[in-house]
Amino acid sequence: MTEAQRVHWLGRELQLRLMLPLLAIVIATAALGAYTANRLTHQVFDRWLLDAAYSLAQLVRFDHGQAQIDLPPAAATVLAYDDTDQTYYSVVQGPRLLVGQAGLPVQGRDETHYPRGRAFDARIGGQAVRVVTVDVDDGTGHMATVSMAETTLKRERAEQDLRGILWPVAALVLTAFAAILWVVRRTLQPLAAIATRWNQRTQASLQPLAADDLPRELLPFAQALNALLARIRAMLERERAFAANAAHQLRTPLAGLQLGLARAAEAPDLASARQVLRELSDATQRHARLVQQMLVLSRLDPEMRGDRDFQPTDLVALAQGVGAAYADAAIAKGIRLELVAPPQPVQATVQPELLAEALGNLLDNALRYTPAGGRVRVEFELQPPAISVADSGIGTPPAERAAIFERFVRGKGAPGEGSGLGLAIVRDIATLHGATVTRDDGALGGSRYTLRFGAAPASAA
């Protein structure tokens, strides 16, 4: 899915989420309004018809149980008059018709009861009518029924007028939909403009982007983007620094090899040439070690921490394997290499190859700077898991301790040749593991370096 499709999909989702509830509300409101208006309209017409029936009922009198009515011609004319509908009326007592038209319906459908009467739908002469009936009694059980009926033309016209109201409602819905479309598009346009501005800016520079003019909802996104840019800047700076340091450190060894080869070529005899070649062999081994350490450094980018394969590891078993690789060097120098371990395994979640490299650098430094006949000891702690390398060597002057973990830094009085990368590699490996590396004065009289592990890295969890 392309970026344009994602933006279009977001716009459609916003439109649907706004339109569908609005449409549901409008439909429900229109339906409820139409039902309520139709019901009220019918009630109004029913009450008008009931009022006429009540008026006719007031004229009914009882004489010894017999209902009588004196309906003046003018009143009959008023009752029958309607400029739209045809009106019918009757007053009956049992089967006896007192006044009006005979045969008016007494039952029907859609019947509604009112406090003093009832109304229902029926048909007279094939025409739909609305009929109301009102009962009149003399208080002694004698009763007469007053009925009024009219055709439904006025009611039908009223219903048509009510349905006509739906057209403005539909127009209002369409207007609301158009407004939603406009608002969504106007809302997404600044996002596209911001993305374009950021793309143009980040192609020219990785500096933080100004977020002063952004909506509050976009501030977390801007902060996350600026944090990403900061990480990229830091990564590029590390790469530039590494490239510069590598070029500087390799320039001198290569020049030395060239001079050595020239000396070997100009040697006056075979013995002198062999001496120069032996020196070149030692130098080549040192340079190979330097290249190896620089390759290790190039792989220790904190940004790649999530790609590491961390796994639970027994630090004691790992230290035994690394120590075995340095046993010959310790024996050759007459140094006693000790491993003091607890009876149970010391577990930590680590990347074994990198931790072996860090421990190897610590042992290499300890053996390099410990005089013949000295001691190097590997010890462990359980909680939190830790591994330390202590020696009886020359130690580190206090003035130089702050910089010993920096790259290409060696102590001024350090004997022999070294690259100054060993402790920097240890520090970077510890950082990748979420661990700490510290230096203090050990019990053997020299230096002690301790790798202490805390919580497991996120990728291991």
Image (cartoon, grey):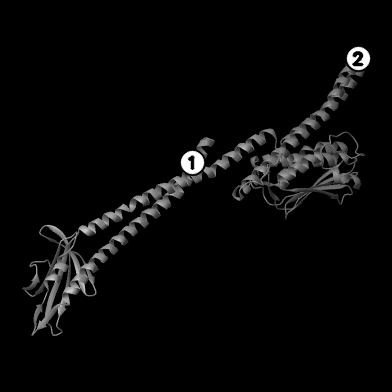
Q: Is residue 286 visible?
A: no
Image position of 311 with respect to 296: above or below:
below
* Residue drawn at x 66%, y 33% as measured from the top left: 203
| Left or right, residue 290 beside residue 147 | right
Using the image, tell me which numbered label, if any, was put on residue 341. Answer: none
Q: CA distance from mark 2 to mark 1?
A: 77 Å
| Left or right, residue 103 beside residue 291 | left
According to the image, label 2 marks what residue?
A: 266
Q: Residues within 10 Å of mark 2 (few under 14, many from 20)?
A: few
- Where residue 362 sits in the image (x, y, percent)? 80, 42
**Residue furthest left in the image:** 96
Image position of 414 with respect to 265: above or below:
below
Image position of 263 with respect to 98: above or below:
above
Quadrant of the rendered image containing residue 244: top right
Earlier in the chain: of badge 2 and badge 1, it is 1
Using the image, tell me which numbered label, if any, was put on residue 9. Answer: 1
Of residues 316 and 361, the one nearer the viewer is 361
* Residue drawn at x 86%, y 18% as measured from the top left: 261
Three-letter amino acid code of the residue under disc 2: Glu
- Where residue 311 sits in the image (x, y, percent)? 65, 45
Callout count: 2
- Where residue 117 sits in the image (x, y, percent)? 20, 73
Three-letter amino acid code of the residue under disc 1: Trp
Quadrant of the rendered image containing residue 274: top right
Q: Secondary structure at mark 2?
A: loop
| Left or right, residue 182 beside residue 135 | right
Given this view, does label 2 or label 1 mark the residue nearer the observer?
1
Q: Is residue 6 visible?
A: yes
- Where residue 158 sits in the image (x, y, percent)? 26, 58
Of residues 44 and 70, the one nearer the viewer is 70
Q: Secondary structure at mark 1?
A: helix
